[in-house]
Image (cartoon, rainbow, N blue to C red):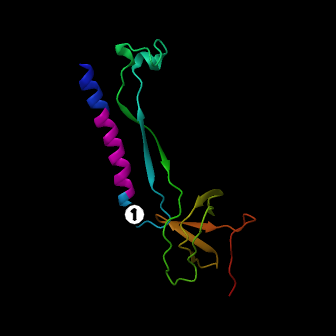
Amino acid sequence: MPYGLYIAAEGAHAQDRRLTVLANNLANVDTVGFKRQLAICQARYTEPISRGSELPGSGRWTDLSGGVVVSMTKTDFSQGPLKETRSPFDFAIRGEGFFTVQKDNEVYLTRAGNFQLNGRGQLVTQFGGDQYLVLNDAGQPIVLDG
């Protein structure tokens, strides 16, 4: 494949990945506790440089750019807007930190603070159709009496 077409294809592939990340961010804009993803793009080295048979800055044709690539996605943990819900069991975290929740002896972290009480007085949150117990600082389920 001619070199220019290869670079154009790499650019199209990077844009496709970037748009996939953006579409996911838009689809979850109203999801409680959702943190957007960032697509990190960078210049791609040519194959000879990547293999180590050439060095960057040689001035040869193999030193040309290899196009652009999405090297990784990162979660943006910056503070989002807080919304008043008037529910006595909804909480928000201002600044850094997470709530810890548990299901089937597995502990997870979340910033979603839309909690409720289950039939046993335990503070829980829901993801999908599953209930997760909200844990206190000692790692025990939070139980509210009466």
Region rendered in magenta: 11-25
Asked which quadrant contains residue 11, the reply is top left
- Name the foreground residue: 66 vs 99: 66
Does the magenta stretch mainly form a helix, a strand or a loop?
helix
- Residues 81 and 111: in front is 81
Q: Quadrant of residue 3?
A: top left
Q: Quadrant of the C terminus?
A: bottom right
Q: Quadrant of the N terminus?
A: top left
Percent coordinates x, y for residue 90 in the rendering: 55, 77
Where is residue 135? Give x, y as percent: 67, 67
21 drawn magenta: yes
What residue is disc 1 on? 29
In the displayed structure, does residue 138 sit left or right of residue 93? right
Which residue appears at 35% of the width and 42% of the height? 17
Q: Callout 1: 10 Å neighbours few (<14), some, many (20+)?
A: few
All told, the count of numbered labels is: 1
Residue 12 position in % (x across, y down): 28, 36
Residue 125: in magenta span:
no
Q: Is residue 98 left or right of residue 76?
A: right
Q: Amino acid at mark 1?
A: Val
Q: Which residue appears at 39% of the width and 18% of the height?
A: 63
> Does 140 appear above or below 3?
below
Q: Is residue 4 above or below residue 98?
A: above
What residue sits 36% from the left and 25% below the top?
66
Any part of residue 69 in sight: yes
Residue 1 at least partly seen: no
In this view, the residue farthest toward the right is 138
Residue 6 or residue 98, whichever sits in front = 6
Residue 44 lies, with reference to residue 98, above or below; the image says: above
**SS at badge 1:** loop
- Across and down, in percent, residue 2 comes to 23, 19
